[in-house]
Image (cartoon, rainbow, N blue to C red):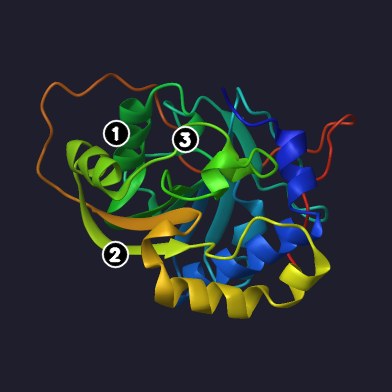
């Protein structure tokens, strides 16, 4: 079952969600420092993490699964969100340099077709970053955050999924070592708790972040995909749409 887009929006406006956004964005930026001249796309619910790239990348966009629903993002200017079937992305072959999949894989109806579609849209040197719940963590057992919903994964499972979808793994890390407790004392010290947890118990972070590189060996028996659009389209804000939280 997919996340509800309204619940995702609400989580990232709460103090704990703001802290999660800060921790994960810090790790993502450490990995993807330079996106100048590149196309960066988010799949799932990525707006909280895409904001820093809007002034740096050539193009930025967010594709939200139809079963999840979409929110208007950003609140001002051109709308950079589009609603789509997660296995038929409205993007041309080899058109994306960086693709961030967050709140996506754990709720996808069909994981392998989704990853094969990501392979199709990535450029020859393209990278995918998956952020998924860690099955060994307390976050996966707490349903008060999005990381407690859907299918949590182990590192071995993700490694196999990426290999089956023609990706080679280029980096691993665990995040969210602080407990998923929305209490002022925890939130004030969450950076220190994250640092200590990563040092003492590195494998039990609430999220696994894995980066994969597209392999160019031609696959066999590739599933048919829908014709792709030549570029990411922007969509006007519908009257009844709810705004996604802007980046800090």
* Residue 96 image offset from top left, x and y in percent: 40, 51
Secondary structure at numbered mark 1: helix
Query: Mark 2 or mark 3: which comes first in sequence?
Result: 3
**What quarter of the picture does the C terminus occupy?**
bottom right
Residue hosting label 2: 171
Q: Position of residue 28 (x, y in %)?
A: 48, 67
Q: Residue at x 9, y 43 (%)?
A: 217
The disc label shown at residue 106, or none: 3
Please tell me whether mark 2 or mark 1 is closer to you in this view.
2
Q: Which residue is mark 1?
A: 116
Between tags 1 and 3, which lies in front? Answer: 3
The residue depicted at 30 percent of the width and 38 percent of the height is: 120
Which image quadrant for residue 234? top right
**Nearer to us in this view, 138 or 168:** 138
The answer to whether residue 149 is above or below residue 95 is above
Local crowd at mark 3 within 10 Å, few (<14), some, or many (≥20)? many
Provide residue 92's location: percent of width, then percent of height.
39, 39
The residue under the point 65% across, 38% down is 143
CA separation, marks 2 and 1?
A: 19 Å
């Amino acid at each position: 079952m997919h996340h509800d887009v309204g619940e995702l929006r609400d989580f990232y406006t709460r103090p704990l969600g703001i802290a999660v956004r800060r921790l994960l964005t810090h790790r993502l930026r450490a990995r993807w420092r330079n996106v100048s001249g590149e196309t960066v796309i988010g799949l799932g619910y990525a707006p909280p993490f895409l904001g820093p790239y809007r002034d740096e990348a050539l193009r930025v966009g967010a594709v939200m699964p139809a079963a999840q629903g979409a929110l208007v993002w950003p609140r001002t200017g051109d709308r950079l969100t589009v609603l789509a079937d997660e296995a038929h992305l409205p993007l041309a072959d080899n058109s994306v340099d960086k693709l961030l999949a967050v709140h996506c894989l754990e709720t996808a109806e069909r994981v392998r077709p989704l990853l094969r579609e990501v392979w199709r849209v990535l450029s020859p040197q393209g990278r995918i970053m998956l952020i998924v719940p860690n099955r060994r963590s307390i976050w996966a057992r707490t349903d008060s955050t999005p990381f407690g919903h859907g299918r949590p994964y182990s590192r071995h499972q993700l490694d196999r999924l990426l290999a089956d979808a023609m990706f080679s793994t280029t980096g691993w890390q665990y995040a969210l070592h602080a407990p998923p407790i929305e209490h002022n004392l925890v939130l004030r010290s969450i950076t220190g708790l994250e640092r200590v947890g990563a040092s003492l118990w590195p494998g039990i972070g609430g999220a696994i972040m894995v980066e994969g590189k597209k392999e160019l060996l031609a696959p066999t028996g590739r599933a048919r995909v829908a014709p792709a659009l030549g570029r990411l389209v922007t969509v006007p804000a519908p009257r009844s749409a709810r705004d996604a939280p802007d980046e800090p």
